[in-house]
């Protein structure tokens, strides 16, 4: 029998205190008729925002089923003009460790089907999460939070059973600079992503060999991201996820932060398809 959600959340919070210097504030959101049984969607919020992005998607009935929300290290940034980008975790393994920690907790809870939703910078982080899981490069960093090579394989299997949603994903900081112009802060961020080899559009090759169900969505006339590299991004995504299924949704209207009707329509259609659960990897 599954442990109560309250205990699950409490245990996560206690373990997180020993591993992280900030509060993840992780929560599991359920409708009245739902239980956290075999599936969950974890949401990855955009830059400077917080877990409430995920709560809004659940409250407004966009995301269905159990939803886990949490804060990245660089959350709730009130003023970008006074923020110290030199000390930020953007584009680094430290940015991603909290998400890996939660993936492991879900695995230990017995969840075999995990979906990830990443918005904007959260979509960039999502690609880096997949690439790290599919490589040994950061094996020692993951061991610090209790994730073994076998755990990585099991997490990949759980993600293969779920759905990857990339909603207006960050491709690169360089694309933003090309669109809005160069600023000292963006130069710092660009350097971080480059030196840590975590430029999302370049790390799509980290999906090689995986078999994922992916929905990726781009907006027309996005006021935050340009469409400079959209075609290259899609081409690489399909190339490296050739063993899986990639559905591309383009052309929706509205501002960067507005929910996309075409995306969520496609999401509902996906959920209506017969589920196929893959056997755990050896």
Image (spheres, helix red, strand yellow):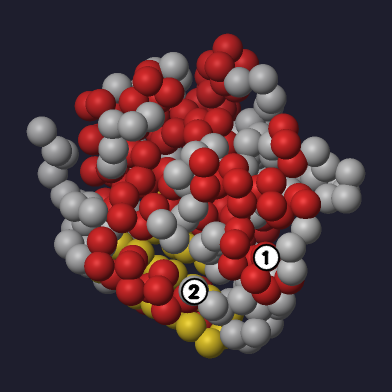
- Circles 2 and 1: CB atoms closer than 8 Å: no
Q: Quadrant of residue 228?
A: bottom right
Packing grade of label 2 (10 A; few <14, some 14-19, many >=20) is: some
Above or below residue 8? Residue 92 is below
In the rendered image, which residue does mark 1 sit on? 177
The location of residue 259, given as percent across then percent down, is 63, 72
- The Cα–Cα distance between marks 2 and 1, rounded to whole angstroms, is 13 Å
Quadrant of res 271:
bottom left
Helix, strand or loop under label 1: helix
Residue pictured at 73% horizontal, 71% vertical: 180
Q: Nearer the viewer, residue 198 or 213?
A: 198
Q: Position of residue 107 (x, y in %)?
A: 34, 32
**Residue sitting at 80 percent across and 38 percent down?**
84
- Residue at figure coordinates x 52%, y 57% from the top left: 123
Please tell me which residue lies in front, 100 or 184.
184
Is residue 212 positioned above or below 150 on the image?
below
**Mark 1 nearby-residue class (10 Å; few <14, some 14–19, many ≥20):** some
**Image location of residue 122, percent across then percent down:** 56, 52
Q: Which residue is mark 2?
A: 229
Q: Quick one: label 2 or label 1, which is nearer the N terminus?
A: 1
Eyeballing the image, is 138 above or below 45? above
Q: Nearer the viewer, mark 2 or mark 1?
A: 1
Q: Quadrant of residue 173?
A: bottom right
Looking at the image, the residue that sits furthest to the left is: 282
Q: Is residue 48 visible?
A: yes
Q: Residue furthest top?
A: 18
Q: Quadrant of the C terminus?
A: top left
> Judging from the image, what secondary structure is the residue with disc 2 in?
loop
User: Do we see residue 120 in this rendering?
Assistant: no
Which of 189 and 123 lies nearest the eye of the viewer? 189
Question: Going by the image, does 228 lie left or right of 231?
Answer: right
């Amino acid at each position: 029998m599954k442990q109560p959600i309250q205990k699950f959340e409490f245990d996560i919070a206690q373990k997180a205190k020993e591993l992280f210097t900030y509060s993840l504030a992780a929560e599991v959101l359920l409708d009245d008729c739902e239980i956290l049984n075999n599936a969950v969607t974890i949401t990855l919020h955009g830059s400077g925002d917080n877990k409430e992005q995920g709560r809004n998607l659940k409250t407004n009935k966009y995301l269905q089923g159990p939803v886990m929300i949490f804060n990245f290290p660089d959350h709730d940034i009130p003023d970008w003009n006074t923020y110290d980008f030199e000390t930020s975790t953007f584009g680094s393994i430290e940015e991603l460790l909290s998400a890996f920690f939660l993936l492991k907790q879900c695995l230990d809870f017995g969840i075999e089907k995990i979906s990830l939703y990443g918005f904007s910078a959260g979509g960039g982080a999502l690609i880096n999460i997949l690439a790290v899981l599919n490589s040994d490069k950061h094996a020692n960093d993951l061991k610090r939070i209790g994730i073994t090579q076998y755990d990585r394989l099991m997490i990949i299997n759980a993600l293969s059973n779920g759905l990857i949603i990339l909603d207006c994903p960050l491709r690169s900081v360089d694309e933003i600079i090309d669109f809005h112009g160069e600023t000292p802060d963006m130069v710092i961020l660009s350097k971080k992503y480059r030196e840590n080899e975590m430029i999302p559009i370049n790390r799509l090759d980290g999906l090689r060999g995986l078999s994922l169900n992916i929905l990726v969505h781009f907006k027309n006339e996005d006021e935050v991201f340009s469409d400079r590299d959209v075609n290259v991004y899609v081409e690489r995504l399909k190339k490296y996820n050739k063993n899986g299924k990639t559905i591309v949704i383009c052309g929706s209207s509205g501002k960067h932060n507005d929910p996309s009707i075409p995306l969520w329509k496609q999401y509902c259609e996906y959920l209506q398809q017969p589920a196929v659960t893959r056997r755990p990897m050896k």
